[in-house]
Image (cartoon, rainbow, N blue to C red):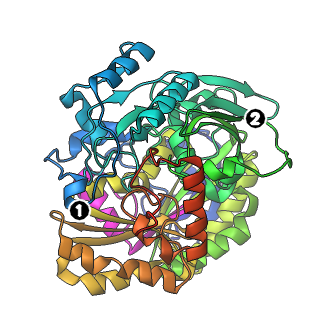
Amino acid sequence: MAASILVRRCQMWTPSKLPTGYHRKALNTQMGSAAMYQLKKKDTQLLKRQIPSGISHMTSRSLHLTLLCFQEVMLTSERYQVQRFPFAHVSDRDLSFFERLMPGRVMTDADELKPFNVDWLKTVRGCSKVLLKPRTTMEISEVLRYCSERNLAVNPQGGNTCLVGGSVPVFDEIILSTALMNQIISFDTVSGILVCQAGCILENLNQYLEQLDFIMPLDLAAKGSCHIGGNVATNAGGLRLLRYGSLRGTVLGLEVVLADGSILNCLTSLRKDNTGYDLKQLFIGSEGTLGIVTAVSILCPRKPKAVNLAFLGCPGFSQVLRTFTTCKGMLGEILSAYEFMDNECMKLVKGHLKLVNPVAESPFYILVETSGSNSVHDEEKLSNFLDHVMTSNLVTDGTLASDDKKIKMLWALRERITEALTCEGYVYKYDISLPVEKIYDLVTDMRTKLGRSAKNVVGYGHLGDGNLHLNITAESYSHSLLEAIEPYVYEWTSQYRGSISAEHGLGFKKKHFIHYSKPQEAVLLMQQFKAMLDPKGILNPYKTLPVKSE
């Protein structure tokens, strides 16, 4: 007897695994009077399974540090043979100035500074001897004015979740943390415009907005640690970009402190402002090299009243692509996310994090999220879509959730891949934009090229945005393996007119490869902007752009 897809409205119902031959009447007896919808299947079975209790959800990367290896990380300057620029060294006089400016918020203890000197992936390490914790824009202004006069280099740092070495010092740059700049300035419930300081944690902002029936327009796996200022500075993408677009569209205004301490107040809350150049776009994605973002004005969408998440297994990548095409056509305006991961990723989250695969093993898995205002309407569209992809053999198995707890459990399988990868040893991470039909070709090509020299080569990402996260693991850092990967991976990407950085930025690790995505004229213009806004080069040095001599 054919199984059935049960799409429900009752948010509190816990789905049960359906035995073969179970009848609708028996299901209603078991589940109670919860309203359900049934869609008969003809060829294949999609069982709405219980999401196993082994799946847990943790959003803060800081909570995952207990799973990571704390071996001493080699200094970035030594591993990459970097020469220090002729900046001044921090003196006792400098420390006295900082202490007078922000009493009790100047950190100099070497042990306390360790986590701020090392990136989350444990791949790069600086040797800063001082960390400052300002609370206000004026304090940052005074710090930068002083550092500019003294020629002291400054490393802006938010939640330190950067994956390309952009958030930690290379040498002894002063770390300027925005952690205490965590105040919400205003929120307009009519326009949905939020104004807040740069150090607000993304997840905290989303929780605040949800109480007012709104949400943030971006969602990241690092949401529990990353700061909105850092999100803006790196033009972070994430899981909601398919629905709400990038920060270049949702950020309405910024307050930025320039290298000389000048405060640029473009913190507008207007949807339309066509007076001159749109200066905020210079700082979105500039990775703290042109100025330090201190406050953000951002447009926030209403919280969807009906959210559904399908976790589906696909027999091949061509089916993943065809399912996406079907998705866009049949789900239309309610489609909010379309993510994919290969089976190698599933093996990692199962093996290292003890998460449980809720569907039959498949070569690929996709997460299809819908968000809308009418649950009945959305469920009908989703049922029709699932019926079509199942009978077309695009999808072989799956599970469906519509209550928040179960949705988070399913998202954990995708969001915690980065964490699972760190348990493998050293991770070579590549954040690539490509035409969607070419995305997985790069993964298979790299597996063939590297063979046994790599421990694992996995692919996952935001298929709806054409964004691949290619990850290659080894027991430990290997320069020979790095040379086998780079610049080949960038040459491959450039061949298909892709981008070598879709959403992570260039940071320290990728700055020398910018020419694979940008013409020389564009790089030269960027360097001219840098020289104009930061003539001494004190803001986040060694990052984002190659120096002219390089």
> Which picture quadrant has residue 457?
bottom left
Rendered position, 324 above or below 413: below
Please tell me which residue lies in front, 54 or 296: 296
Q: Which residue is mark 1?
A: 81
Q: Residue at x 74, y 34 (%)?
A: 193
Rendered position, 18 above or below 154: below
Rendered position, 547 above or below 437: above
Judged left or right of residue 279, residue 219 is: left
Please tell me which residue lies in front, 1 or 122: 122
Q: Which residues are magenta?
A: 338-367
Q: Which residue is mark 2?
A: 192
Residue type beneath disc 1 = Gln
- The image's mark for residue 380 is none
- Considering only order in the chain, which callout, 2 or 1, is on the residue closer to the N terminus? 1
SS type, badge 1:
loop
Q: Is residue 16 magenta?
A: no
Q: Position of residue 336 (x, y in %)?
A: 64, 56
Q: Residue at x 30, y 32 (%)?
A: 90
Mark toward the viewer: 1 or 2: 1
How much space separates mark 1 and mark 2, taking CA atoms?
Answer: 48 Å
Q: Residues within 10 Å of mark 2 (few under 14, many from 20)?
A: some
Question: Can residue 394 be seen here?
Answer: no
Please tell me which residue lies in front, 31 or 148: 148
Residue type beneath disc 2 = Gly
